[in-house]
Amino acid sequence: MRNAALLMMFLPVLPAAAQEPQETRLVVTQGGQEVGREEFTVRASRARGLPGSTIIAAARYPATNPSTRLAATLERTPDSTLAKFQLDVESAGAVTVILAAGSGARLIVRTVARGSESGRELPGGPDVVLLDDGVFSLYMPVAQLATPGGRTLTGIFPRTGTRATFTARRDSGSAGGAGRVALSGDIMGTLVTDAQGRLERLELPAKSTIVTRAE
């Protein structure tokens, strides 16, 4: 009964997040073929007006008559530390809710599905970023954390439990929010953001994935 009650608390979040006004649209291709679409918005604050930033995203695969829908909310503090993360995955008529929050050097992750609930504790900290193979706007904090000399980051994919260690190196000519970031290590590719720090293009050759801003 406790698990069912928790699930009912989180189930309404998916449509609510998906209805947020989306400022930016992305097209996701694999092997040259479009496989999905994503929309996201960025806010210069957190819930209840707290300082920091919030990314709210909604993705669907495929773009037409999707079989999988994802909704994500990522809140970070002014020093880029994780404050709150929620990922709702709707597939085959079932919804799974993944929650994560930082607590000092720890990261607490909970997964709630119909009839089940699980949790785990992982190493956290300012060099940890939460990522997903279907919500690519989550790569924007990587660009914010990147340095010209290269910064080593740990990417955690809460949906699969995968961990990746990689380096994010910002081009020295980048200015303001705009820039190009080279990714190397467990995650290899190129990340491009505009002057507002929003994702413009992401290339992940190992997965034959290219994400581009829709015109």
Image (cartoon, helix red, strand yellow):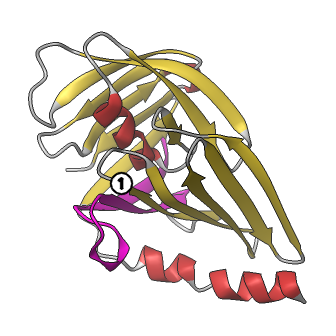
Q: Quadrant of the N terminus?
A: bottom right
Residue 194, image quadrant: top left
Q: Residue at the spot x=83%, y=77% of the render?
A: 114
Residue neighbourhood size for the residue with mark 1, other residues' Cα within 10 Å, grouped as few (<14), some (14–19), many (≥20)? some
Q: Residue 52 at x, y = what percent? A: 29, 58
> As rendered, which of 61 and 79 lies closer to the eye?
79
Q: Residue 200 at x, y = what percent? A: 25, 39
Magenta segment boundaries in residue numbering: 34-62
Q: Residue at the spot x=56%, y=33% of the render?
A: 155
Q: Residue at the spot x=43%, y=55% of the render?
A: 37
Q: Which residue is mark 1?
A: 77
Is residue 187 in view? no
Is residue 41 in view? yes
- Above or below residue 178? Residue 112 is below
> As rendered, which of 186 and 67 lies closer to the eye?
186
Q: Residue 161 at x, y = what percent? A: 74, 42
Horizontal side of residue 60 vs 2, given as left or right: left
- Above or below residue 121? Residue 93 is below
Q: Give the residue type at disc 1.
A: Thr
Seen as rendered, the residue at the extreme front is: 104
Q: Residue at the spot x=75%, y=76% of the render?
A: 93
> As rendered, which of 154 and 103 lies closer to the eye?
103
Horizontal side of residue 54 vs 209, given as left or right: left
Q: Residue 2 at x, y = what percent? A: 86, 86
Magenta stretch mostly in which secondary structure? Answer: strand
> As rendered, which of 135 and 33 lies closer to the eye?
135
Magenta-drawn stretch contains 15: no
Residue 197, image quadrant: top left
- Above or below residue 132? Residue 98 is below
